[in-house]
Image (tube, coloured by chain):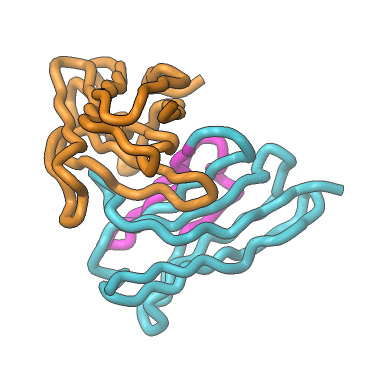
Chain colours: A cyan, B orange
Amino acid sequence: EVQMVESGGGLIQPGGSLRLSCEVSGFTVSMNFMSWVRQSPGKGLEWVSVMYNDDRTDYADSVKGRFTISRDNSKNTMYLQLNSLRAEDTAVYYCARGKWELSAWGQGTPVTVSS
Amino acid sequence: QSVLTQPPSLSAAPGQKVTISCSGDSSNIGDNYVSWYQQLPGTAPKLLIYENKRRPSGIPDRFSGSKSGTSATLAITGIQTGDEADYYCGTWGDKLRLGNYVFGGGTKVTVL
């Protein structure tokens, strides 16, 4: 059974940093395309970042240079490092499996950027 | 402003058929497969349709997808109260980039 569990969200001041984790069971993270998607309160879905199985990465323009996607193969876990956080980064962050379609999602972890 | 355009809301009586449109252009829908996601209230999105019309295991055949040119459609036949949710279309936005998944703004479906 596929399970994806995000953690690491919370309340953070503008300019601060957080590291989100996505612990995966049921498939191997390093053999899959893995994405992060966020959803601001009451809004739609916004793709944030992707990591390919060959370690290549890409980011939405809105987070490029501030967020970093990575993984720890030994822990079968994805990460999203969030730096220089802004109020507009407030959202629920989901990790998701896949590239052409996002076939499995975690339950999400909320991030609130506020002073 | 979302890259893909969906109607913000739709409503239908139980048992009716609902169709949700998703409009894009030649760089996204016109050149890639479309997926559809269902987000029930307070939950994470779930893949409903992939590769324009294929259903993952466990998705009832009441849900169907189609694509023509730069538009795609999700149809729900015999809609049930449990289908009340937000529905999002998604596709790859630009094949020249490693990553650029784009979503529609979502359609809130209400079952009257």
Q: Residue at x 42, y 76 (%)?
A: A72
B95 shown above or below B19? below
Lateral position of residue B107 relative to residue A102, left or right: right
Quarter of image, res A52? bottom left
Image coordinates for residue A62, horizontal then vertical, percent? 56, 36
Can I make out residue B14 in this image? Answer: yes
Image coordinates for residue A63, horizontal then vertical, percent? 56, 42
| Region rendered in magenta | A45-69
Image coordinates for residue A108, horizontal then vertical, percent? 52, 57
Q: Is residue B65 magenta?
A: no
A101 shown above or below A43? below
Look at the image and tell me in which quarter the C terminus of chain B lies: top left
Residue nearest the observer in this picture, B17 or B40: B17
Image coordinates for residue B4, horizontal then vertical, percent? 37, 22
Give the tally of numbered discs.
0
A50 shown above or below A42? below
Lateral position of residue B108 relative to residue A112, left or right: left
Lateral position of residue B56 relative to residue A87, left or right: left
